[in-house]
Amino acid sequence: MMLHIPNVLTREQVRQMRAAIDAAGWVDGRATVGAQGALVKHNRQLPEDDPVALEQGRVILQALAANAQFFSAALPARQMPPLFNRYTAGETYGLHVDGAVRRLPGAAPWLRTDVSSTLFLCDPEDYDGGELVVVDTYGTHEVKLPAGDLIVYPSSSLHRVEPVTRGERVCSFFWTQSMVRCDAQRGMLLELDQAIQQLRTRLGETEQTVALTGHYHNLLRMWAEV
């Protein structure tokens, strides 16, 4: 399941975030990947423990906590702190799959990466190339979104970032461990939740919407790992 979630950050939030991170100390992006990723990754990142990255990551997490669409799609149990990357001319990240687990900073537990997210912090006209390309059983999907918009997709998907040929691509990215580990089950719950909300908007609260809401929560109760 891939989902475009618009306006996770406002234009003013993006402007303030860019002012903060653009002035921070960027490093080689290969510092945060394993041997396979290092062969195909050519970009820059803010270090995971950079104070600016941590502060701006908290802004993103607060915005996500208030976003009903993200909650419905990801059903987050735990999240990695957001990271930040940038690509300029010639930089790219070849085809790869995200690691299945990551260690939470400053903590012993591992986080299972169920849902990958990319939050765009620049507009499509700011750069050429740089499309996020996700490959799944339904084909190949190219993603290039306005600043402040988010794309979520299964972490099990093969994906790449096309070479940037002009300008600069700046994004935040992070992983979520979902309460529901199966992507197909998350997709069904999302579709059911969206249908319930649409019926409630059109018809108000009815006996049918209450019944469907009950089915939604009973399925979530059946599938959730908390």
Image: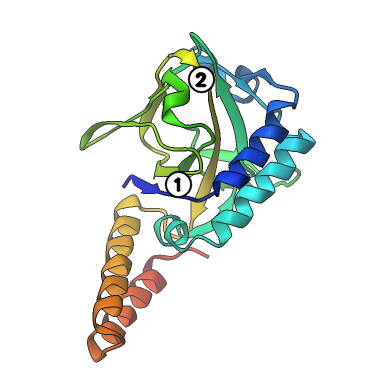
Q: Residues within 10 Å of mark 2 (few under 14, many from 20)?
A: many
Query: Disc 2 vs disc 1: Cβ atoms closer than 8 Å?
Result: no
Q: Residue at x 75, y 36 (%)?
A: 52
Q: What is the x, y in percent for residue 187? A: 30, 56
Q: What is the x, y in percent for residue 100? A: 49, 38
State how many labels appear.
2
Extreme residue toward the right, this view:
51
Is 43 displayed left or right of 142 in the figure?
right
Q: Amino acid at mark 1?
A: Asp
Residue 37: numbered disc: 2
The one of 102 and 8 positioned closer to us in this rendering: 8
Sequence-earlier tag: 2 or 1: 2
Q: Secondary structure at mark 1?
A: loop
- Asked whether residue 97 is in view, the answer is no
Residue 131 vertical placement versus 65 (above, below): above
Quadrant position of residue 144: top left
Extreme residue toward the top, this view:
90
Q: How is the image coloured?
A: rainbow
- Asked whether residue 153 is in view, the answer is yes
Q: What is the x, y in percent for residue 164? A: 45, 15
Q: What is the x, y in percent for residue 89? A: 51, 10
The one of 158 and 210 positioned closer to us in this rendering: 210
Q: Residue at x 61, y 46 (%)?
A: 12
The residue to which callout 1 is attached is 114
Q: Residue at x 38, y 76 (%)?
A: 217
Is 46 displayed left or right of 173 in the figure?
right
* Cα gap from disc 2 to disc 1, whole angstroms: 18 Å
